[in-house]
Amino acid sequence: MASKTYYDLLEIPPTSSLDEVKRAFRLQIARYHPDKVHHLGKEFQEMAAERAAELTEAYRILTDEAKRAEYDQSIAAGGGQVPPAPRPSAAAPTDAPPAAPPRRAPEEPAVPLGKQFTQERASRDEFVRKATVNRVRQALDAVGGGYDETEVRGFDIACVPKNRMFGRSKNPRLLGRFVSTLDREAVADAWLQAAKWGDSAKDDVCVLLMGTSLAPAGELAGEIANQRRRSRGAKLTLIPVDASIWSAHMPLDAPDIAKSLIARLKSGG
């Protein structure tokens, strides 16, 4: 993959104005704020801290007219890629220019910027998805729900109640899916797939639809109500979850296991 420049890091073109640089920085740095990643574990927190350091250095260079001119010249010479991020420190940042990075090998193929951004976002979403799903598994084990894990196409986690000696458990089947953007389309697709699984076994199904970027609560509630009207009789509960803070739009008739699971996730225990 072609080396990234500070412009690539901020997802802006080299012709961007000072105000556009500042807006892009605010947008990008917010994604890696400690409040956004504290729930995902130490590994992701460290990765987010390193990315925040890279973004801060990009902002420092591109908002200084003289430093930006020098940096643009280094790009023209083929050596303006992003250097490794310094370890976060409590000390104030220095105004010294960054060390000259190595030149890119001439034979290294260039990657279109649009494709590069897509690849980076996909990698970030995949990391967050895995961390989120692992947290759900850990919380489910902690609340003692009595489930066996299975596989359901289109979902990151699927669990069925364990058989009891004297009859079946009253707990519903559980499904979990992480989406980068939790909106109407995400609700409709998750509902459709979950309803098929529930119909096949005539069991209650509870879906945790998780994301870190959520549409307004009214929009999500409206789509859930719309899906309920379309599938009358379906024994399905869908719960939108903000995975950045483990806050859920919990319906009054949500199963107890879902309430316990969200409470456990929110407490961080």
Image (cartoon, rainbow, N blue to C red):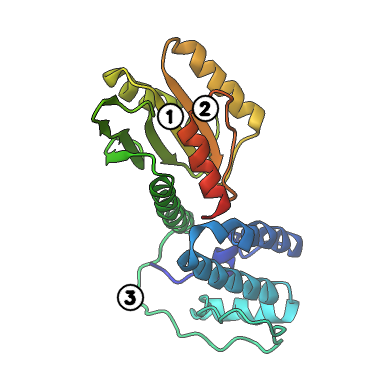
Task: Tell me what residue is drawn at x 29 percent, y 25 percent.
Answer: 168
Q: Are marks 3 and 1 in contact (CB under 8 Å)?
A: no
Question: Quadrant of residue 48 in the image?
Answer: bottom right
Q: Are marks 3 and 2 in contact (CB under 8 Å)?
A: no
Residue 161 image offset from top left, x and y in percent = 31, 33
Q: Residue beneath label 1, please?
A: 206
Residue 157 image offset from top left, x and y in percent = 35, 41
Residue 94 image offset from top left, x and y in percent = 70, 87
Question: Quadrant of residue 22 in the image?
Answer: bottom right
Task: Tell me what residue is drawn at x 51 percent, y 76 percent.
Answer: 81
Between 209 and 27, the one lying in front of the other is 209
Say what secondary structure mark 1 lies in.
strand
Q: Mark 3 vs mark 1: which is more N-terminal?
A: 3
Q: Amino acid at mark 1?
A: Cys
- Classed neighbour count for the residue bearing mark 2: other residues with Cα under 10 Å, few (<14), some (14–19), many (≥20): some
CA separation in Å, label 3 and label 2: 58 Å
Looking at the image, is 54 positioned above or below residue 176? below
- Give the left or right position of residue 63, taking residue 57 as reference: right
Q: Residue beneath label 2, please?
A: 254
Residue 69 image offset from top left, x and y in percent = 67, 78
Residue 33 visible: no
Q: Residue beneath label 3, please?
A: 107
Between 150 and 63, the one lying in front of the other is 150
Say what secondary structure mark 2 lies in.
loop
Q: Amino acid at mark 3?
A: Glu
Say what secondary structure mark 3 lies in.
loop
